[in-house]
Image (spheres, rainbow, N blue to C red):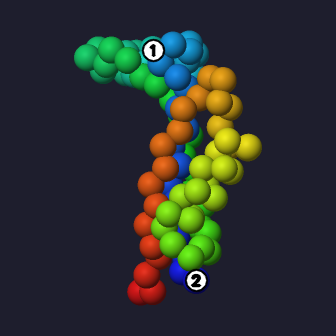
Amino acid sequence: MATFIAHVNVMLRPVINDPQGLAVKDGLHSLGFEGVSTVRVGKRVDITVDADSAATAETQVREMCRQLLANPVIEDFEITVAEVTAA
């Protein structure tokens, strides 16, 4: 069994209003960053999991997203998985 790190990015779907993103955009404009046209705010979750393969680790993390980490009605998620190597 190997250890894998999964990086999960959860974002609101494009059609969902993002009030936090709008607040960040307004804050950036007030700081002089007038070229910013859109800001979307999401979350990143890093999960370390022991599994037989990267595919198994990804399947487990995908199920975690479906059950807890993301709201499938308003959010999309992306997963990347890499094996952890000893330093």
Residue at horizontal 65%, vertical 37%?
A: 70
Residue 6, x across and y down, in percent = 52, 60
Q: Which class describes the residues within 10 Å of circle 1: few (<14), some (14-19), or many (20+)? A: some
Q: Amino acid type of disc 1?
A: Asp
Residue 16, x across and y down, in percent = 56, 15
Residue at horizontal 43%, vertical 18%?
A: 25
Which quadrant of the structure image shows residue 3? bottom right
- The Cα–Cα distance between marks 1 and 2, rounded to whole angstroms, is 48 Å
Disc sitting over residue 1 in the figure: 2
Label 1: state its secondary structure.
helix
Q: Where is the C terminus found, in terms of image quarters?
A: bottom left
Read off the residue under disc 1: 26
Q: Closer to the camera, 25 or 51?
A: 51
Label 2: state its secondary structure.
loop
- Residue at the extreme right: 67
Which quadrant of the structure image shows residue 38? top left
Disc sitting over residue 51 in the figure: none
Q: Is residue 69 above or below residue 17?
A: below
Q: Amino acid type of disc 2?
A: Met
Q: Closer to the camera, 63 or 23?
A: 63
Q: Is residue 73 above or below residue 68?
A: above
Residue 42, x across and y down, in percent = 53, 34
